[in-house]
Image (cartoon, rainbow, N blue to C red):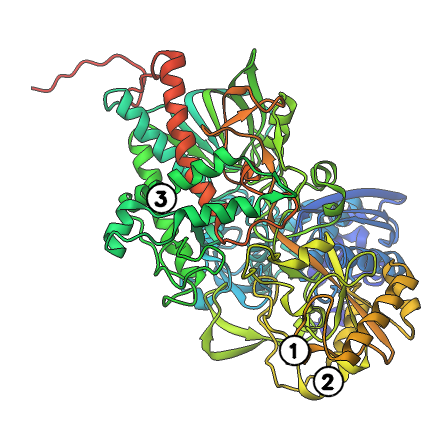
Amino acid sequence: MGEMLKHKGLSRRSFLKGAALGLAGAGAVGAALPLAGCAGGGADKMAATGEATASATVPGFGGDVTVELTVDRGSGSVVAATIDAPMETPNRGGRAATVMQEAMAENATIDVDAVSGATVTSEAIKSASVQAYNEAIGAAEDASSAVMKPGTYTGYAKGYWQIWDLPVTITVNDRSILKIEVPDDRFQHGETEVILQSVKDLLFPRIIENQSVAVDAVTGATASSNAVKSAITQALKEALEAGGSNPHAVSAFQVAPEKPEPSDPETIDVDVCVVGMGTGGIIAMKRACECIRAMNGGGRVSLLGIDRAGKYGGKSALTHEGCAVNPPQYMEAINGGEPFVDAERFKEKWKHFTTTDGTQMAKEDVIDLFFAESGNTIDWLYGQDWIFGSMGKPNPMTEGLTSYNVALTSNTDVGTYEDRRAVLDTYYKQMLAAVEAQGGRYMLETEGYELITEGDRVTGVKARNLYTGQEYVINAKAIIMNTGGFSANPDMVNELLDEPWRGERKRIGTDQDTGAMIQAALNIGAGTFNIGMSPNVMHVTCDHWLSRYPINFYDDVLDGRTGRYKTWTLNNIPLACGITADAIMVNQEGKRYMDEARYESFSADIDSESWPCFAAGSCFYTILSDEVLSTIANEGFNNIPKFEGYCSQGDIPGEMPVPEVYEGLEFSIEEGMAWKADTLSALAEQIGVPAATLEETVAAYNKLVEAGADTDFGKDPKFLKKIATGPFYAVQVFNASFSTAGGLDVDTQIRVLKDDHATPIEGLYAIGVDSMGVLLNPNHNYVGFGGVAQGWLWTSGRLAAEDAARYINETYGGFTYVSPALVDVEAKSTAR
């Protein structure tokens, strides 16, 4: 035995360590058993007989992944395995959970292959499996003997975009992680910089403090957090191997730290609490600070902001333009005092858009308020030293200039969204520093979830820290809600949205819009306005990206969304097939419902729909035949007027033949994103639409093709192509939303109204998406003007802060005195 081990380059001791850690597979563990009695610690425990069950939970791509294993402690074999990954993408991370669970059960080992296209979830499953296996066989404590060679080591993992490697360098001594570093240059990693910064600020210290990569991901930065943890794990294995240890001893750094026992809630007393520190929340904090100081004689302020994410800025930090109407000072500075738009004509168009069959579906007084105050908001921001990009071209819907882009304007000024995000982040820092200088403060990873009331008045909010579990009772004289709606809460989506808009929805952003505060407001009798309307749909996506093909780079074009060199890859085949204009797009009833060439675009006139793809609800199906696919194979994807920007890994160059299109669709079928059949009726059965309806739809479309004119939806004749020759394919395309659009009912002082739609709930305000429905028509998708969500966020945030300060001063007779002293102890100066 000793000679055999020597031949394999393993000492007897290291072989036993590997067996005790349970990472060599059932066969290898079994081979080690004759030596188990000669070893100490965990190896002794391996000699125990009978079955043991243990589980472990680690963060995956979208949420926690839990692995439960039943292990035969006599043989080391896995008897049963259950993997629960409820928050992972069903056809990606969810598929990895299913495949790896079956493989563990079939092969009686946790040593199974990762699933292509689900790297983060696969790594999470492997990590949880190691922890559960070690606990089941009673060998976990042996991992503490892991020894590393001191030095620096670098691991690599892909984050959110799954395009670029994120290099993570660790410095270690023989037992511990001492330092964690990532590059500062955005071209050396692929993460959104402001999100990666939150990982550096919060996750790095947690890992070092706990000496574990099994700490919680930073809220709102899950993908970047998991990439960092995966890269660190890789680097640790290298350090262990260099130190002569089995690299599987990395499990010593994969033990989840124990959560502290819940303590009594901490009470915090403030005048104003802003719940949700997106752009509007930060504006509200800064404006409240100014107004309170103007009323309290220039004193300090009692002001608190909280946000459930590990960063401030919210989803609005990742977007760009805000709508506003003729800011007087900015017009003077930029346009010689001339109006940017005919305000009355624009207002007339807006109210026409929000009218259905003669009935005004929005609140006219709030529209009037927006027209009167949005320009003043731009002037106020300009006075805060914000700069805005070039005004660009007139909007055909508004017939003027109504979009204000922070720092730079896309497709007009030099720069990318990533540049804009960096500049905007400096504005946030500047505003928050000014608030903190006057006594205000903020807490991140802290979610408000319940309103405190006294009679009909809101007097505070209950909140908890999502990392520590610490509960807070925040007594506040005014609460300003800025929580972004409820699109990340499937239960609320299916309960509150009208029937056509329910179902699984894909979202853009950081998924912090859980609806907790919307529900809290509903629980105390708040009214809603247009809450059942479609979410704000401006993009489309397939369930996930393929990961079968290489990523290629354009060497002379930067991508606006990422700020890096633009990419193209055949991983986009399912999405490209889903948005090619020479196919047919049908709704969930099997009916064609739009001009496929305009699936994703702003309308040029007030009576047409922007992003008409929204009308299908959560998803639609693109039907393709050999006529379409053979053209793609031989000539390329030349019939896509606009390639999806946010929900892809770049694009696929036009005029490049793509013979791989058939292969890519087969991969898509394998991964649950597409279906194939020899007949339309068989295809209809697979996607769950009536066969007769789909056949009639295709037959009617083919007649339009023969006639050379799309008299139903007006598609350009150059995109008309018959869908006649099988096999036929269907690709599922999801309508991706930025947020819900309807929300709470508010008045012109941004006060939340009761469900009688007349009585204000004293002390409660709702800004941004939490109340945007007052400006919209539920019979349309969002608006075609551009920037209304951001514009309302800015203006409602400023106005809510002003009214909250007025309300506190009048109702409570003034504001809380905030001492500049650091401690509440009387002191006498001895200075001379």
Residue picked out by circle 1: 639
Secondary structure beneath disc 1? Answer: loop
The amino acid pointed to by label 1 is: Asn
* Quadrant of the snapshot with the N terminus: bottom right
Residue picked out by circle 2: 631
The amino acid pointed to by label 3 is: Gly
**Distance from label 1 to label 2 (Cα)?**
10 Å
On the question of residue 263 being in view, the answer is no
Please determine whether, in this image, residue 58 is positioned above or below residue 570: above
Secondary structure beneath disc 2? Answer: helix
**Distance from label 1 to label 3 (Cα)?**
41 Å
Sooner in the amino-acid sequence: mark 1 or mark 3: 3
Q: Residue at x 73, y 69 (%)?
A: 711
**Image check: 103 left or right of 153?**
right
Q: Residue at x 66, y 71 (%)?
A: 572
* Quadrant of the snapshot with the C terminus: top left
* Residue 375: image tag: 3
**Image check: 758 left or right of 706?**
left
